[in-house]
Image (cartoon, rainbow, N blue to C red):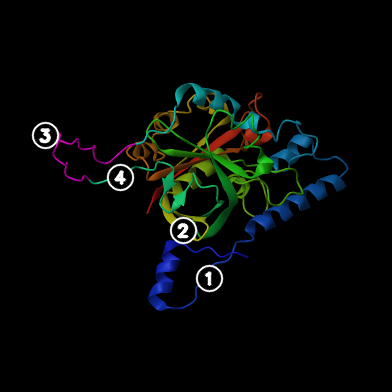
């Protein structure tokens, strides 16, 4: 089992020269087991629980919409807007090119090679590299893993090609209006027996459910958690390269605002800063390549009205922004 360490743990190990290994938390597996136990109890009562009641406990039935696993359903509208609003990532230099001066016969002085800003890099992580990327969130004493996924840079055919199908284990990255990286990951799972889920499933469950019992939280509780995780460390790994960052903004889009959020793609961070002013996204607007925004879907929470236009696992959206340490 692979070991992940936070920057604090790395620094401590370097200072004491002692082995201090952090292993993957099994809490998420306990949550699944608890949820299945509740489901089994419900079945034994001969239908005492209605399907909606079981769904409120975090379970998902096999008789789902056959398109539920389609990447097109998750990102189709946003992709159409991106195709209209975005263009190739600009190549920005930190200093202008110097033109040769003087008589034509004179040899110009050699000039330094302009440094090119690579917008798809995040510390030691290169999203233009096809090597897989893993992420580890250190949240309030818990460690939540986003398993390895293959990064794909946005292009107009990314959906029609099937590259962003959930089963492909990929994540699509695009640049917003301020050259900030926005990473789209699949969440949810294939069914109640799927313990692994898709890329952001464990992070989604950590935020949405009470530990061990699998009962869904209320919106106020989730918003409090999102506030409390600000400043938490996120470690990214690609091959043997690590990058350390901290959460600087976090927001959940409620079912009633999902349709509006899907119309604000290229300007998503401006929209988040306007709609959710105390979540940190106003500070994100002051950053460029030092910020990575991770986006994934969620379910409706306890007490929320259902959005009839979205299936169970796409009722809401999460946005979590991290900044290089």
Residue 209, given in percent of the width and then of the height, sits at 62, 47
Please tell me the numbered disc located at residue 21.
Answer: 1
Magenta residues, dominant SS class: loop
Image quadrant occupied by the C terminus: bottom left
Residue 260's disc is: none
Please, what secondary structure does the residue beneath circle 4 have?
Answer: loop
Q: Residue at x 20, y 46 (%)?
A: 110
Pointer 1 or 2: first along the chain? 1
How far is mark 4 from mark 2, CA to CA? 23 Å
Magenta stretch holds residue 98: yes
Quarter of the image holding residue 298?
Answer: top right
Q: Residue furthest left?
A: 102
Residue 253 x/y as whole percent:
52, 33
Percent across and percent down for residue 58 are 69, 43
Q: Is residue 33 magenta?
A: no
Which disc is residue 103 wearing?
Answer: 3
Label 2 belongs to which residue? 242
The residue indicated by pointer 4 is: 115
């Amino acid at each position: 089992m692979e070991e992940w360490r936070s920057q604090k743990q790395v620094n401590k190990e370097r200072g004491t020269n002692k082995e201090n290994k952090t292993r993957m938390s099994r809490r998420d597996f306990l949550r699944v087991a608890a949820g299945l136990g509740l489901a089994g109890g419900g079945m034994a009562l001969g239908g005492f629980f209605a399907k909606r009641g079981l769904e409120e406990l975090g379970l998902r039935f096999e008789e789902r919409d056959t398109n539920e696993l389609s990447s097109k359903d998750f990102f189709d509208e946003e992709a159409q807007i991106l195709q209209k609003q975005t263009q190739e990532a600009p190549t920005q230099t930190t200093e202008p090119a110097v033109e040769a001066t003087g008589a034509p016969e004179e040899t110009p002085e050699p000039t330094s090679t302009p440094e090119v800003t690579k917008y798809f890099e995040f510390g030691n992580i290169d999203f233009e590299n096809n090597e897989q990327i893993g992420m580890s969130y250190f949240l309030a004493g818990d460690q939540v893993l986003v398993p390895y996924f293959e990064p794909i840079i946005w292009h107009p055919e990314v959906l029609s090609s099937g590259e962003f199908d959930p089963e492909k284990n990929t994540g699509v990255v695009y640049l917003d209006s301020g050259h900030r990286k926005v990473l789209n990951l699949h969440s949810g799972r294939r069914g109640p027996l799927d313990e692994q889920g898709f890329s952001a499933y464990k992070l989604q469950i950590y935020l949405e459910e009470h530990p061990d019992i699998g009962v869904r939280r209320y919106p106020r509780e989730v918003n409090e958690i999102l506030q409390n995780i600000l400043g938490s460390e996120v470690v990214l790994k690609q091959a043997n390269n690590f990058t350390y960052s901290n959460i600087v903004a976090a927001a959940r889009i409620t079912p009633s605002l999902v349709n509006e959020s899907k119309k604000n793609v290229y300007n998503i961070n401006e929209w988040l800063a306007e709609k959710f002013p105390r979540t940190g996204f106003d500070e994100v607007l002051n950053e460029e390549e030092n910020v990575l925004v991770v986006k994934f879907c969620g379910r409706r929470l306890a007490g929320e009205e259902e959005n009839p236009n979205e299936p169970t696992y796409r009722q809401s959206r999460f946005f979590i922004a991290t900044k290089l340490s």
